[in-house]
Image (cartoon, rainbow, N blue to C red):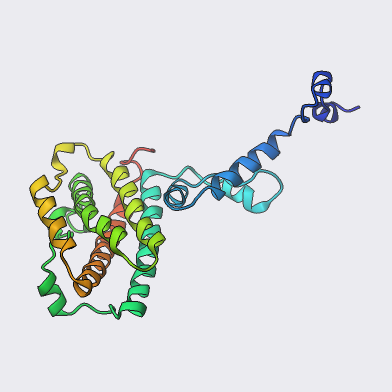
Amino acid sequence: MSEAHSALEPTRNERELHLPSRIPAMTFLSTSAFSSLAFSLGLLLVMATAFPTPGPLGGDSKGDATSNRPPLTSADKMEELIKYILDKISALKKEMCDKYNKCEDSKEALAENNLNLPKLAEKDGCFQSGFNQETCLTRITTGLQEFQIYLKFLQDKYEGDKENAKSVHTSTNVLLQMLRRKVKNQDEVTTPGPTAEVSLQAKLQSQDEWLRHTTIHLTLRSLEDFLQFSLRAVRIMSPGHLRLL
């Protein structure tokens, strides 16, 4: 009997105890990789997208191509996660347009809501001209922190696809944590004070149905704009400047 074949035969103790035969390492790895991908639901789907697992080993050409890829950098992972969130936002905006006729922003809606949603400006160092990585990382992190109360409202009050609404909230929080780890001076990342947060929560909760839908729509549109600028900034960042997670 060949050495390779004997390695797959059950040992005497395994036969006596009715234990299963040893499984080849290749089969175990393939099953493990499949399980990791199959476990990607909700937030776990976000994590699987941001931190891809290797494909199955063996003769599959796709698996070989995947296994030969270089390790993803922090910037790569953030880029994939941002694109994932943007896809979810696009789906929610389409649903709002179809169900609630919230397709375009009107001056009336903007004036009546008076929302102070985060934006990226030239002074934030995130644009090609005058790019400053540390300033940009700090501003994006602060902005995503400011979005959290609006995204919690979206998750709680959205009446359409609640899974997508929850995914936008949780995956944005994952991105926030990834970015926060890259900021050198944590004190520069500001968060809304307790009084301001309570006041904003009360304002959001008191809205009628029309304003509630408008707030959700404006939140999605503003987050989409914010993330699109953030995506461009992440692409500018040199992999050498961001350590591997």
Position of 71 compared to 89: left or right? right
Image location (x, y in percent) of residue 215: 21, 68
Residue found at the very far top of the displayed protein: 13
- Identify which residue, 233 or 80, lies in the foreground: 80
Image location (x, y in percent) of residue 14: 79, 23
**At x 80% / y 30%, what residue is drawn?**
8
**Looking at the image, is 121 positioned above or below residue 190?**
below
How many marks overall?
0
Q: Quadrant of residue 7?
A: top right
- Identify which residue, 233 or 149, lies in the foreground: 149
Residue found at the very far left of the displayed protein: 195
**Looking at the image, is 19 positioned above or below residue 235?**
above
- Identify which residue, 213 or 148, lies in the foreground: 213
**At x 50% / y 44%, what residue is drawn?**
70
Image location (x, y in percent) of residue 150: 22, 58
Q: Is residue 243 visible?
A: yes
Position of 101 compared to 15: left or right? left
Image location (x, y in percent) of residue 200: 13, 57
Position of 16 compared to 31: left or right? right
Which quadrant, please, contains the C terminus? Answer: top left
Residue found at the very far right of the displayed protein: 1
Which quadrant, please, contains the N terminus? Answer: top right
**At x 41% / y 50%, what residue is drawn?**
43
Q: Quadrant of residue 6?
A: top right
Q: Is residue 193 visible?
A: no
